[in-house]
Image (spheres, helix red, strand yellow):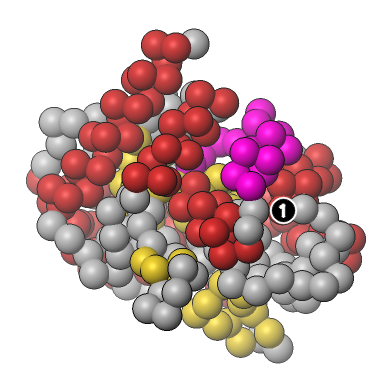
């Protein structure tokens, strides 16, 4: 296991199984300095786990979890959490993150990330679980803003207020998904700039960029992660990295995976925007 120091703020891509062989034998010419994986895809898959171990000797790895279910009434089983911690011991990820959502109920884990009302009760429950897991993993957790398609009547916090309160209660960081933010701004009529002005920027450690599609029957957007980043999301991103140039940026693509050159082109564009932002500081 290579004990990497954190790479300097730079652009990474989501390492899906389709790209494992590429990164086993290639170091891209463009500045891909780190990779992000869903650890759940490796804890029970020995062949790919060995490939990931090899890749982690050449690239720093970030863990983006999809199963910690921070907003649930209960955390996942101790066996599941132990499996993630064992993989952490092998790969030594330099960041670990999950979502502001829930997906565990009565001991059963669901594949979707479900929204929760932004209330004091939700805040206290999430803060408790974040504190437990940060102690368990001995790492800071980053919490990602969700994509949602419904709102709750009893919500008492705005989303950035809720994220800010979590960081104050737990010391966690924020993973700002710019695509999620844009999707919600369209679906719920949010003002992007108001959201960004409310956010605690010192807590933002990572940024995600991804694609979405428009529903066939209207202007409703669906966060699909199967398209290139759209012009509107690139525009929001440029404002975001001017506010927090120290954050890492990830190109995220999960469905209908393209050839690797498509992701590298997206990463190249993000790198150019990061360089321009640094020149403006």
Q: Is residue 24 visible?
A: no
Q: Position of residue 254 (x, y in %)?
A: 33, 64
Q: Which residue lies at the image location 52% right of the left edge and 33% below the top edge? A: 240
Q: Is residue 198 above or below residue 260?
A: above
For the image, the number of numbered tags is 1
* The quarter of the displayed image where residue 41 is located: bottom left
Where residue 183 sits in the image (x, y, percent)?
51, 59
Most foreground residue, 216 or 24: 216
Residue 157 appears left or right of 223? right
Picture quadrant of residue 202: top right
Q: Residue at x 19, y 57 (%)?
A: 19
Asked if residue 239 is positioned above or below residue 96 in the image, the reply reads above
Most extreme residue toward the right, as rendered?
120
Q: Position of residue 181 (x, y in %)?
A: 55, 52
- 205 part of magenta stretch: yes
Q: Is residue 197 covered in magenta? A: yes
Dot 1 falls on a residue whose secondary structure is helix
Which portion, as a residue range, is magenta?
A: 191-207
Residue name at image x 57 percent, y 82 percent: 109
Which is more toward the observer, 194 or 202? Answer: 194
Callout 1 crowding tier (Cα within 10 Å): few <14, some 14–19, many ≥20: some
Residue at figure coordinates x 41%, y 46% from the top left: 232
Q: Quadrant of the N terminus?
A: top left
Q: Residue furthest front?
A: 218
Asked whether, in this view, residue 253 is left or right of residue 107, the answer is: left
Q: Give the answer, above or below, for where 101 lies relative to 164.
A: below
Residue 45 visible in rendering:
yes
- Percent of width and height locating residue 237: 45, 37
Q: Residue at the left extreme?
A: 25
Mark 1 lies on residue: 159
């Amino acid at each position: 296991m290579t004990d990497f120091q954190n790479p300097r703020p730079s652009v990474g891509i989501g390492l899906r199984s389709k790209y494992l062989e590429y990164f086993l034998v290639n170091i891209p010419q463009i500045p891909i300095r780190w990779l992000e994986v869903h650890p759940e895809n490796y804890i029970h898959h020995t062949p790919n786990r060995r490939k990931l171990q090899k890749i982690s000797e050449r690239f720093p790895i970030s863990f983006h979890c999809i199963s910690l279910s921070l907003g649930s009434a209960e955390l996942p089983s101790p066996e599941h959490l132990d499996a993630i911690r064992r993989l952490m011991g092998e790969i030594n990820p330099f960041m670990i993150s999950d979502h502001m959502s829930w997906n565990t109920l009565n001991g059963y884990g669901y594949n979707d990330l479900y929204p929760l009302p932004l209330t004091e009760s939700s805040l206290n429950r999430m803060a408790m679980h974040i504190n437990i897991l940060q102690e368990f993993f001995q790492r800071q957790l980053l919490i990602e803003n969700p994509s949602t398609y419904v709102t709750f009547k009893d919500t008492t916090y705005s989303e950035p207020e809720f994220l800010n309160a979590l960081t104050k209660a737990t010391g966690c960081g924020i993973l700002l998904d710019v695509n999620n933010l844009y999707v919600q701004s369209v679906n719920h009529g949010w003002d992007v700039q108001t959201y960004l002005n409310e956010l605690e920027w010192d807590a933002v450690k990572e940024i995600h960029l991804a694609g979405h599609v428009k529903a066939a029957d209207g202007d409703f957007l669906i966060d699909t992660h199967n398209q290139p980043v759209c012009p509107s999301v690139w525009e929001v991103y440029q404002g975001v990295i001017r506010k927090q140039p120290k954050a890492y940026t990830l190109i995220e693509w999960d469905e209908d995976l393209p050839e690797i050159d498509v992701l590298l082109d997206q990463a190249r564009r993000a790198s150019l925007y990061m360089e321009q932002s640094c020149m403006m500081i």
